[in-house]
Structures are given as structure tokens and as C-alpha cells.
Image (spheres, helix red, strand yellow):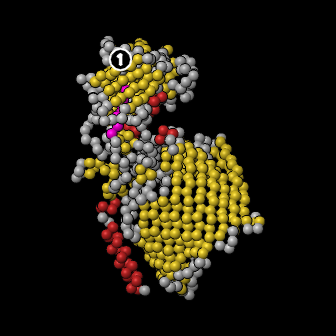
Amino acid sequence: MVQLKKIAWFFTIVLLLISCSEDFFDKAIDIDVNEHTSKLAGTALLGANNESDLVLVSFSQGPFEKTIENQILKDATVTLTGNNSTIDFQSNAQNDFFVANTNANLNFIPNNEYTLTIAASNYETITATQTYPEEVPILEATITENTLKIKINDNPNQKNYYLLGLERVEGNETSGVYVVPFGSLTKESGFCYNCVSFNDDTFNGEQDFEIVVGHDSYDFMSEATYRVILYHITEDFYRYDTTLRISNYAEDNPFVEPVILHRNFENGYGVFALVNKTELIFNN
Amino acid sequence: MKIGNLKANIGLHASGFAIGDKKYSSIQPRVGLRYLVNKKWSLKASYASMTQYINLLTNESIGLPTDLWVPSTERIKPQTSWQATLGVATTFKNNLEFSVEGYYKKMDNVISYKEGASFFNIEENWEDKITQGNGTAYGLEFLLQKNRGKTTGWIGYTLAWNNRQFNDINSGKEFPFKFDRRHDFEMVAIHKFSDKLHLSGTWVYSTGNAISLTEATYTSFDQNGRLEPISIVGTKNSYRMPSYHRLDLGLEFIKKTRWGERAWIVGVYNAYMHSNPFYVYLGENFDTNKQEYRQVSLIPLLPSISYRFKF
């Protein structure tokens, strides 16, 4: 019995010493991950105005395959169909984007459907369809040192989604002013750094509804001209914007719940969004 | 209640819970049936309805695993569920028992962290960080037991599925729960060499926890036209950590004394030092300059000594 005890002690101590290797506590592992098949990825934000109607075509890579900084594809065919017409987008030689042909008139009609198609050799074609949102005029805007207030009429017959931004206008120059959430109605935007996003869950259909947001009061000027910009956005863009905001926060943070970034392209990644932009210039 | 070879346990459980201005109540019927087919075979079936006012909140990030129990509140409804089971049991060779049981459980108002939430963020109200949805769990359990003789123990195996669905997680699509373990195996054996010396061993094996990993990257742009990288997490919990297994051993030295019985128990946890994953992170391999998944393990081998005195 005594001998057995000694043997048990010996093995316990030896095993304990052997086990304390660095490799035990932290080591590389193989996780069964399917080999990534590269897909097209599009980011298209159209409808605000022709200048900012941009389409970016990218291609996906697996997380461990990343070989280049920007995964841009310029050799692609980008077409927008809707309103009984088809508009081709051309690769812009000066930058990475695709823009509509100069003679094309991107005249979006509210409540009409538009489909964006991106095709490239060796990739599956991706498509996404959006309905162009109605214009939502800003009825009134006022600004104080801390808050910006706007009034809008919300359409009661549908769910509506918005992005709100602010600029200060000095002659021909404009400078962005950060607007920030004030209360629970609005959230920071993921796509637009100095905007807030919100939906009409809590005020659906209200008329003359006042939205209050905070703003960066550091360079507030009591006597200045401001431009408030309201984007009436599609649900897909709102969901993309929201998930992008929280995924930016979650990225590289292993303690944050994983975020599934919203996408609406079939057979690929990315988002096609239509926005109807309205603005109001006012003097404080 | 007993009618011939049929034995039934029928019950009704009522409970209530009040918090703030909110009052919850429930009536939960429960039925257990056992039918003796003959001396060796029996059939079992049960149905139970349950309501619970504390809820398991599991962190499903790939980082530090934390499970919290949180109460129902005015906003967080109690979790309700019902479970039905059907099984068969038999004995053979006089000292072996075998049973197999299928189960199905439907859960409502289960809770989960919202996407992007972090339990580290203590500035945010915890109720704002969670969402409620539903879940299903089903599977088959096999159990072989030996209760008599010098060597006793059991072997248990469960083939299981456990899924969750929340409107605002994973685009509303159903996904595997973190603890969706397809295979769960446990083997326990105790051998009595003599009245003074017992050796016990337990070996457990289970499928690794379900985790979400980055599936792809692409390039997008922001409102200023600046390019920015985008990481895409695939379907939630669509990947698996490495499987979990370990062996625990114990030696029990027993001695009768004038006042009773004393025992020294020398044990070792994780005897063959398998590095089971505690959490996973994405790290860089500095030799290859490539990213790789790495696991952190906690306990390589844990010896233990305990003393027991019975009188």
C-alpha cells in the first residue's frame, strides 16, 4: 500500500511538471473552415445626387488569404435597371469607383423598383433590388448650442428609416458638424461618421414630429448658416448601417458578441442602397 | 397512481413571480408514465411544462466564456418550455441496465446578448443588451449501467441538437446554440481492489462549442468615399471549437477506525493533459506573418488530495 502511494505521488508530480509547457496554454489550432470561394462584393449608394452616386466593386477573400490592401475589381460590368430603362456604369479612371455614364440621367422615381447587377468574369453575377424612398421634406430646423431640432411628416403607411447630418455653410465652403444621439430615438451611423440614424418605430405616422439630436458644440456659432440633410433610406441600408456600426465596435474584440453584417446582394456580399436626400439651409 | 403494469405520476405545479409592477404566474402540468412490459423491459414517457424566473445568459463571443444567471424583470419575460420524452429500459445478466430515451424540448423567451453587445460594457443597462427568442433541443440519450460487482459504473452517450432563433440575431435565422453538442459521451468506472483500495476513472468527450468566425473580407467605402475593409462573419455559430475530452482518475485509500471509516483520496484531473479550449482568439503567427486561430487552455493537470471521515 505504501509503495502504491509513492507511485501515485511520483506520477502526479511528473505529470504536473510536464504539463506546464507554454504550448499547452496557448497554441494554434485547426478549425474546420471551408475553403473560401471568392465572390463579388458591391457597395452602391445611389439616389442622393449624381455626384455622389457611386458603386464600388470588390471581391471577397478568406480571412487568412488576404494578400492586398484593397480588394478592388475594376474589370466588371455594372448596370442599373428600373423605370423601363437600363443605365450602364463605367469604371472611373481617376479613382476606384464606377459611376453612371455621363449622358445617363439617374432620375429616380419614388416607390419604383431598381435592380443593380454586377458581373465579372470568373465570378457569379450578383444582384440586388431596392425601392426608391419618397422625399421627406424638412419642415423646420432650429439649432442651439447643444441641440439640433428638425420637424418632419412621417408617412404612416410604411416603416421609414432615416439618416441625419449637419453642415455649417460659410460662403461656398461647407464644413461637417458632428451630430450625435440625444435620447434613445437616434443612434450613431455606421456608414456616415458625423450622422445619426433612426427609424419611425416610436413615432410612426406623426405629423410635425420633432427630432432632437445633439451636435458638436465646440465650433458652434450663434450667427451662422447651417444645412441640415435628411436622407430617407431603405430598410436594407438602415440594417447595413446599424450592423456596420456595431461590427466596427466588435471588430478585433473577442469579448463582443459576433455581428452578422447585413447584405442584400444575392450570390455575393455588400449592399445596394437607395436614398432620397432632402436638405434645408437655415440661418440661426 | 398505479393501474396494472402502468405507473403514473401526475402533477400540477403553480408558481408566481412579482417584480416592480409586473406579476407573472403559471400553471405547469407534468406527467410521468412507466409501463412494465415484463420483468426485464419497461417503457417510459413524460411530459412537463416549465416556467423559470431566472434565465441563463451565455456570452457567445469567441473570447472569455461567461455564463450569468439573470432574473426576469418587467421587460424580460420568464422563460417557458415544455418537454416530452419517450424511452425504453431493460435489465440483462442481472446486473446491467440499459436505457434509451428520446426527448424534444421547446423553449420560449430564452435570452441572449444582442449582436455587438459586450458583458464588459457596464455603462449600458444589461436589459438593453439582451433580446428574447425561442429555442428547441432534441436528441437521444443512451445509458448502460452496472450497479453490482467489483467493477461498477456507467457509459452514457447523447446525440443532441440545440438551436436558437431570435428576430434580431443572425438576420432572424435559426442557429446552433453555443452548447449544441452533437456528441456527448461519459464513461465512469469504479473498481474495488479490496475494501481498502478503490480506483475510479471518468472519461468525458463532447463536441466543441459552436462559435462564429470571420468568413471573408472585402473592401467597401464610407460617406467620404474612403475605402475601408469589411470583415464578414458567416452564419452565427457555424464553426466548432476543437472537441473537449479529459480523463479524471482517483485512488481511494480506506481504513476502518474505532470511530468510523476514514479515506484518503488522491486524484488527478485531466490525467493525460489534453489541452481543452477555454476560448479562441485570432492571433498572428510571427514566423509566417499570417493570422491564425489560437486556443487558450486553462488546466493542464490538477492533482488533488482529499480526506473523508464517516462515522
Return the x and y of residue A78 as percentages of the image width and height.
Answer: 34, 25
Magenta segment? A38-44
Q: Residue at x 62, y 50 (%)?
A: B81
Q: Position of residue B105 (x, y in %)?
A: 60, 53
The answer to whether residue B174 is magenta is no
* Placement of B129 over or under B199, stated as above or below: above
- The quarter of the rendered structure image containing the N terminus of chain A is bottom left
- In this view, the residue in front, A112 or B262, is A112
Q: Amino acid at mark 1?
A: Asn
The residue lying toward the viewer, choosing from A123 and B165, is A123
Q: Is residue A31 left or right of residue B184?
A: left
**Residue A219 visible within the image:** no
| A200 relative to A19 in the view: left or right | right
The residue furthest bottom is B258
Q: Give the image quarter of residue B272.
A: bottom left
Image quadrant assignment for residue B247: bottom left
Q: Position of residue B87 (x, y in %)?
A: 62, 62
Q: Residue furthest right?
A: B3
Image: B56 above or below A244: below
**Element marked by disc 1:** helix
